[in-house]
Image (cartoon, rainbow, N blue to C red):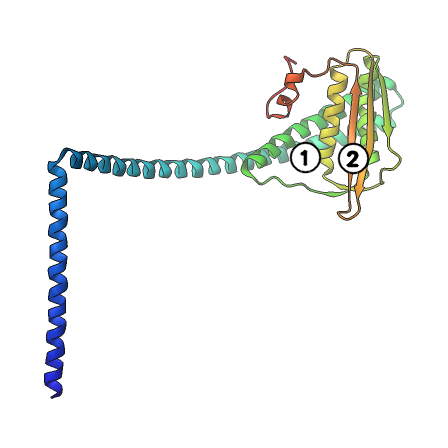
Amino acid sequence: MIVNTLKSKQKESVAALEDEIYNLKAKILDQEKIIKHATNSSRGRLALDQIKKIESLEAEIKRQKKRVKDAKAIAQEAHKVKSEFLSNIRHEIRTPMNSIIVFAEMLVQESTAPKLQNYAKNIYNAGKKLLEMIDDIIDLSKVETGTFTLEEKPVDIKKLIENIVKFQRDEAMRKGLEFTLDIDDELPDSLMLDESKIEDIFTNLIENAIKFTDRGFVHVKLVENGKDIVKNSINISLVVEDSGVGINEEDKEKIFEIFEKSGEN
């Protein structure tokens, strides 16, 4: 009885499988007829041509994606090599240059001869400028690779601006300019800042004002624009006013773009 039941179930399974195979063959034959009909008709041929074009485009897109991926990998490796090279250059230059800057600063502070002091200040300023240029190149490379970060620490903002103005004053006096500094008394003694970046910004603003002012004045103001107690933050502004040539209206936005400047100078 059990054997007969099993045989019956096997027959049913085989019959079901035969039905599926038959149906599958029928579908294949139908597809072949459709393709044959499509091939023999103008619309069908056009449709097949379009399908081939789409497949060709898809293959080309895949190839282009691979090329872009490979190019991106090469560019990232190039940026990495460039950053490592620039870091090594900075290290090799910074060590001897720091010694030059330190001794120049000592001469400025200890020398009683005005002419010697002026020479020492020029050496100090040139050395600092060279290191800043190298750091700017490093920072630009970091910005390009998305690895740029700020290094914040407590900074005496008043002392910082006073030191910058002190080393810019000689050039202003040489040109016969009225050069003043006004610091807001409400400013705190210490702020969390990236000192080198703030120093670069302040120096560039004041330096450019003196450079492009042939007569008249350069007035520097450091002011507070309000506090946010909840965020424990403060807004400050460095205002540099001068009687120089100024910036053309159409150039005001352009100067904030990389490798751009106003006018021919």
User: In the image, residue 32 lies at what x, y percent?
Assistant: 12, 47
Residue tagged 1: 95
Residue at image location 37% in from the left, 38% down from the top: 65
| Amino acid tagged 2 | Ile
Residue tagged 2: 236
Q: Would residue 2 appear left or right of 169 to someone viewing this image?
A: left
Q: Quadrant of the C terminus?
A: top right
Q: Quadrant of the N terminus?
A: bottom left
Kindly give the residue lying farthest to the bottom in the view shown: 1
- Please say if 6 is above or below 122: below
User: In the image, residue 38 lies at what x, y percent?
Assistant: 14, 39
User: In the image, residue 194 lies at what x, y percent?
Assistant: 72, 39
User: Within 10 angstroms of label 1, few (less than 14), some, or many (20 or more) residues?
Assistant: few
| Amino acid tagged 1 | Thr
- Please say if 11 is above or below 54: below
- Please say if 124 is above or below 53: above
| Secondary structure of the residue carrying numbered label 1 | helix
Q: Would residue 31 appear left or right of 93 to someone viewing this image?
A: left
